[in-house]
Amino acid sequence: MTNEKSEKSEGRELYEWAQTLVCSVLSVVLVFTFVIRLIGVDGHSMLPTLQHGDRLMVLTSMFCGNYQPGDIVILRKNSFMPEPIVKRVIATEGQLVDIDFNTGSVFVDGERLNELYINEPTYTNEGTVFPLRVPEGSLFVMGDNRNASNDSRDSRLGTVDTRYVIGRAVFLIFPGQDVSTGKREFGRIGGIG
């Protein structure tokens, strides 16, 4: 009789472990499908903020749809580029963007931006006509490496409908090799602002 109770108890315990394991795996799959994505940076358009090969944790647009200037977003517009691209939000719907390509200055709503995060001033004009009012439901995005970035200055991309945004980068989980030193700077791991 005790042997039979022991077998039932072991069977119940095994069932509970299996149920816990299945629920845990399902939870992880759901989180990494609908809440968080891991995306790698491909290219040098976000230097010095992000390096080629950086791995980012991205909060999906379902949970962070209210984008603000300064946010780093990942977007995909197949007619522009088939792979996801990483850019910084410069302006949101209704804002007026202007760029003085002689001085390299970017203006939003008449205010010159203090862009401490850029690699160099913005001298490259990609074909978009300025000043430009950002349409409703859209963003104006640029790379931090301004003169080596295909972004909203390129008329093929232009302002980006927020439906093309995959999400907002929130955390650098693994650094790529620094372009100048060739080494990984693990001290860069952390939140992205």
Image (cartoon, rainbow, N blue to C red):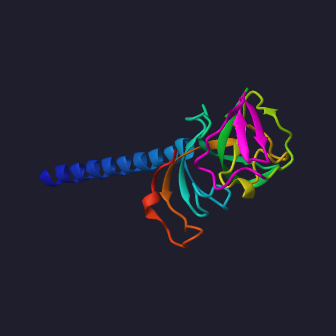
Q: Please state if 15 lies on the left or on the right of 4 as rendered.
A: right
| Magenta-drawn segment | 95-123
> Farthest bottom residue?
182
Does the image show residue 140?
Answer: no
Q: Give me the residue at 54% from left, 72% from top.
A: 181
Above or below residue 174? Residue 74 is above
Q: Quadrant of residue 180?
A: bottom right
* Residue 114 lies within the magenta run: yes
- Name the foreground residue: 88 vs 120: 120
Q: Give me the residue at 77% from left, 41% from top.
A: 99
Q: Please state if 60 lies on the left or on the right of 143 as rendered.
A: left
- Name the foreground residue: 146 vs 15: 146
- Name the foreground residue: 51 vs 39: 51
Q: Position of residue 98 (x, y in %)?
A: 77, 37
Q: Position of residue 110 (x, y in %)?
A: 72, 30
> Farthest front residue?
103
Above or below residue 177? Residue 138 is above
